[in-house]
Image (cartoon, grey):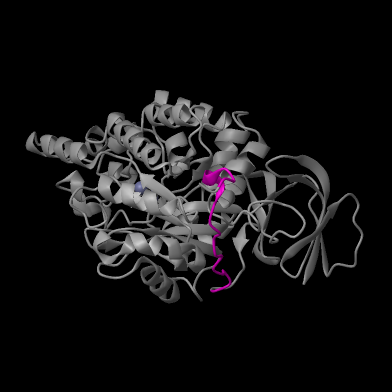
Amino acid sequence: MSFLIKNGTIVTSVDEFKGDVLIKDGKILAIGEKLCNNADEVIDAKGMYVMPGGVDQHVHFSFEFNGEKVRGFETSNAAAVGGTTTVIEFVNQIEGKGLIDSIDDYRKENADGIAMVDYSFHGVITDPSTGVFDEIEKLPEAGYPTVKLFMAYKGMFFHADDDTIAKSMEKAKDFGVTIMVHAENADLIDLLQKNCIEKGNIEPYYHAVSRPPIVEVEATERAISIAKLMDAPLYVVHVSTKGAVDAIKRARAEGLPIYGETCTHYLTLNKENLAKPDFEGAKYVCSPALREQDDIDYLWTSIKNNWLNAISSDHCGFDWEKQKHMGKNDFRNIPNGAPGMENRLGVLWTTGVETGRISRKQLVDLFATTPAKINGIGHRKGHIGVGYDADIIIYNPNHKSKISAKNSLQGVDYNSYEGFEQIGRPEKVFLRGNLIVEEGKYIGEKGQGKFIPGKPYGLCYDGVKR
Ligand code: DUC
Ligand code: ZN
Ligand code: ZN
């Protein structure tokens, strides 16, 4: 099946121009002015923006907290309607098992034949006892060139200490594997949490009180120091504070290959949400915690100036009614995480592009192009160019809607952006040349998403083999 998308404004991370895009056999075949061809279907995109499908490199479809599990790949059509055509999810190493086997097994059971957008994986090291460091060199061959380590979550099986981080980096740098960290100081959080509980401060708001900016800043600086010592690249996920941005900025100014992302919610939601009455605040319990306005403003400045390099959703779908309520009497038991893969583009367009804070090109870069490059899939994803996968969004900037959990496909009983007035929407979305969203509705099929192996030496390596 071939499509000719005519008369749209094509937006890439480096260019914006009026033109046509011809797609055939899943790939972009031609881009130009007034292309004429006998495509099977011609689509008039006049007045619309034609952009690459989003790459959400930070989603959780298997995260567990106190035995409670998030919604999985069966809800990935939500990413599609939100203009995201590739998701990259974090898979924990199973205790006593190798990292590659853990991801392979997870993938076969939970993603293959189920996913509705394309997908790739980051491995999460949880068990250093299995010879996992020696396995790092085999990750690129398996198509998993990224590894995440959780500096937070003291006492949980996925917490990683500095020794694990250093050893991972030492190995990773020789094989082009990118180490990513969730940077928060686990010990300090544990101490502050206990202090809150001892004083009877059990409500969701104290999640934020016990995770102040300094715990993120300290861990970010420490991770950078370890990366410097090991001469390894580093990618810091979900940066939420000025101090952490500054640490990354300083490192890059020194010439170190240190990169970072922020997330939609850190740009648009604030700490006061956690104070909502009737336990509504629990909906906003995620880690790092939501911040105050000065940090939020600085994050906008950071994405505009390329101090941070990508915007992810950190999608993590726990229900409020049953799952978040586990922490009714102790905020420490509230599962951490917020849904958001469906809303990343609409919210960023409305709060970023429509307000003039960032340009459309910058949005494309942060939403699709750079995340693809960081994860070794930039040769086929995240860009509108000849030979790339035909993952394309036709964005209608004139559509107006109100975000609501009841119209959402995320499979979660709340939406963090409930009532948000969104400007524009992905009218049509193509996944490798297949039309999967039409008039904003998902029309694809379960299992249409495919595994996209990542290549090593992603963007954090700056094109240099270290
Ligand atoms: N933080 C979250 O809020 N959810 C998932 C994992 C994480 O680190
Ligand atoms: Zn995290
Ligand atoms: Zn996360």
In percent of the image, x 34 and y 59: which residue is there? Answer: 133
- Within the magenta stretch, is there residue 318? no
- Which residue range is magenta in the image? 447-464
Q: Position of residue 237 (x, y in %)?
A: 42, 44
Q: Position of residue 445 (x, y in %)?
A: 58, 73
Q: Considering only vertical position in the picture, is 318 above or below 350?
A: below
Q: Considering only vertical position in the picture, is 34 above or below 350?
A: below
Q: Is residue 446 left or right of residue 4?
A: left
Q: Is residue 201 visible?
A: no
Q: Is residue 447 visible?
A: yes
Q: Is residue 199 left or right of residue 58?
A: left
162 and 72: which is toward the camera:
162
Say which quadrant the N terminus sits in. Answer: bottom right
Q: Position of residue 425 (x, y in %)?
A: 62, 49
Query: How many numbered tags mark residues here?
Result: 0
In percent of the image, x 56 and y 69: which residue is there? Answer: 449
In percent of the image, x 34 and y 43: which residue is there? Answer: 284
Q: Considering only vertical position in the picture, is 285 above or below 393?
A: above
Q: Position of residue 108 (x, y in %)?
A: 44, 76
In percent of the image, x 36 and y 27: which residue is there? Answer: 292
457 and 330: which is toward the camera:
457
- Within the magenta stretch, is there residue 455? yes
Residue extending furthest toward the left: 198
